[in-house]
Amino acid sequence: MLASDLRNVLEELYEAGAYRVPADEIYWPRELHPAVFRALNMQYLTRTELDDGRVEFSLTQAGYEAIDADVPWSYILRRRMQDFFRFGKSR
C-alpha cells in the first residue's frame, strides 16, 4: 500500500504521459516534493537530465505496478527505438 502523497506523484506522472515527460509539464505542488524524492529513491520513477539542461521523468515498471497500471511496452519500445535512431544520426 502506497502513501497517498506517493500515489499522487506517480498518478500525476502517469496522466502526463508516463515516459520522458518534461518536468515543466508536470505539476507537483511544493508539499509533494518529498514524495518525488522518495519515488526516485524507491525507483518508481527515473529522472533524466538532457544536454540542454531540460529534465524529464519516466515511470519505471515498479512505478506502473505501484499504481496498478499496465505497462505500455509497445509505446515504450517505440519511443526507445526512436531515441536510438536519433542518437545514431547525431554522431
Image (cartoon, helix red, strand yellow):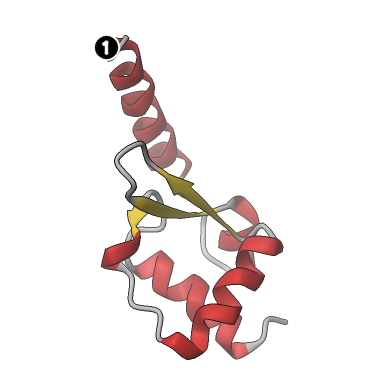
- Left or right: 83, with 66 as reference point: left
Where in the figure is residue 3, as x and y percent of width and height? 66, 87
Give percent across and percent down for residue 50.
Answer: 37, 41
Callout 1: helix, strand or loop? helix
Q: Quadrant of the N terminus?
A: bottom right
Q: Nearer the viewer, residue 28 or 54?
A: 54
- Residue drawn 29% across and 21% down? 86
**Percent from the top left, x then y, of residue 41?**
69, 62
- Up-down relation of residue 51 to residue 88 (above or below): below
Q: Quadrant of residue 16?
A: bottom left
The residue located at (38%, 49%) in the rendering is 20
The residue lying at 49 percent from left, 76 percent from top is 9
Residue 91 in sight here: yes
Residue 48 as seen in the image, left or right of residue 61: left
Marker count (numbered): 1
Residue wearing tag 1: 89
Provide residue 90's location: percent of width, then percent of height: 28, 15
- From what the image shows, is residue 57 above or below residue 15? above
Answer with the quarter of the image where residue 2 lies: bottom right
The C terminus is located in which quarter?
A: top left
Amino acid type assigned to the residue bearing label 1 in the image:
Lys
Q: Is residue 67 visible?
A: no
* Quadrant in the rendering for residue 44: bottom right
Q: Is residue 61 left or right of residue 90?
A: right
Tag 1: Cα neighbours inside 10 Å, few (<14), some, or many (≥20)?
A: few
Q: Is residue 5 above or below residue 52?
A: below
- Residue located at (35% from left, 36% from top): 51
